[in-house]
Amino acid sequence: MRSFTYERAKTPQQAATAVAGRPGAKFIAGGTNLLDLMKLEIERPTHLVDIQDAGLGAVTDTADGGLRIGAFVSNTALSAHPRVMRDYAVLTRAIQAGASGQLRNKATTGGNLLQRTRCPYFYDPNMPCNKRKPGSGCSAIGGFSRQLGVVGVSDSCIATYPGDMANALAVLGAAVETVMPDGATRSIAMGDFHRLWGTTPEIETALQPGELITAVTLPRPPGGKHIYRKVRDRASYAFAIVSVAAVIQPDGSGRVAFGGVAPRPWRSDAADAALPTGAKAVAAKAFAEATPRDDNRFKIALAERTLAGVLAEARS
Ligand code: SF4
């Protein structure tokens, strides 16, 4: 690991200003992904700005009946929060499907959204990777791509966003609150937060340089049945091959997001509109523009079958 300097910010804006004012600076929260990447020298920050003292650790009710989750709230605390368990259970289930107990104790709400892909070539500095080194090529295209994306990908990168929590946030209609170095704030809809790769896969989110996630907000509880189903190669501590987050109402309508298939939680209004007609119709809409590789084509059928199981569970 390369040497770096470190400071703790006392406020969110102080953190944003510190990162924006120093080339190579980065935020650190739980560090569960960043430190691994630093040890591999994939991430090489010159300065870390720790946000643990910046007052971002609370979960509070909002005036409209929703919930505001501070960016530093741990995954463990969030999944066990009484209102999340009661009103947003798909979020509890998604978080508990991810990583290990130890990692969930350290991983944070903001950091979870910013975790980087688990494409094996991204983690191997000896292999070309447009995301790690722009313009160097993509080893996964024509290489081993079983784990990688089938939709929303590009000729530059076919990696997936690997997380679970964000899939639940997508079906819940969450928004990401941020602060800029000049103190301005904004709210980014979950569906706009993660970028599709296009020709610049190194740019993964809508965040501007120095912009800090301060919270995630949830609208009023949607009701319905909350289900998260994750298909993976082993029973725990593995990333999704395919996952489905769903909130299904008694009349069969609802919202659904697929994980493990795209650069972002993959959902659309057209796919949701097909929910009362069944999994086949939803998958046809969701994957209409899929561009799978030979060794990950199976993900489309697997996503449809996983959703069929979710819909059967919702009816039971
Ligand atoms: Fe890199 Fe993306 Fe290609 Fe993986 S899929 S090697 S992350 S460019």
Image (cartoon, rainbow, N blue to C red):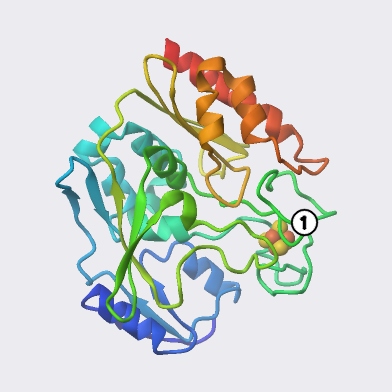
In the displayed structure, would residue 61 be above or below residue 112?
above
Lateral position of residue 86 relative to residue 302, left or right: left
Mark yes or no: residue 73 visible.
yes
| Rendering quarter of residue 156 | bottom right
In the rendering, at what x and y percent does residue 16 appear?
A: 34, 78
Kind of residue at disc 1: Ala
Question: Residue 159: image x %, image y %?
Answer: 66, 54
Q: Name which residue lies at 79% across and 50% down.
A: 144
Q: Kindly identify the residue that appears in the image at 76 percent across and 44 percent down.
A: 291
The answer to whether residue 279 is above or below residue 271 is: above
Relative image position of residue 126 (x, y in whole percent):
76, 72
In the image, 26 versus 154, the foreground residue is 154
Q: Which residue is mark 1?
A: 140
- Compared to residue 244, the image places residue 293 above or below, namely below
The residue that appears at 83% across and 40% down in the rendered structure is 294
Secondary structure under tag 1 reads: loop
Ligand 1 within 8 angstroms of badge 1 C-beta:
yes
Residue projecting furthest to the top: 316
Q: Quadrant of the C terminus?
A: top left
Image quarter of residue 296: top right
Q: Is residue 297 left or right of residue 36?
A: right
Q: Is residue 150 above or below residue 86?
A: below
Q: Quadrant of ligand 1?
A: bottom right
Image location of residue 158, percent across then percent down: 71, 54
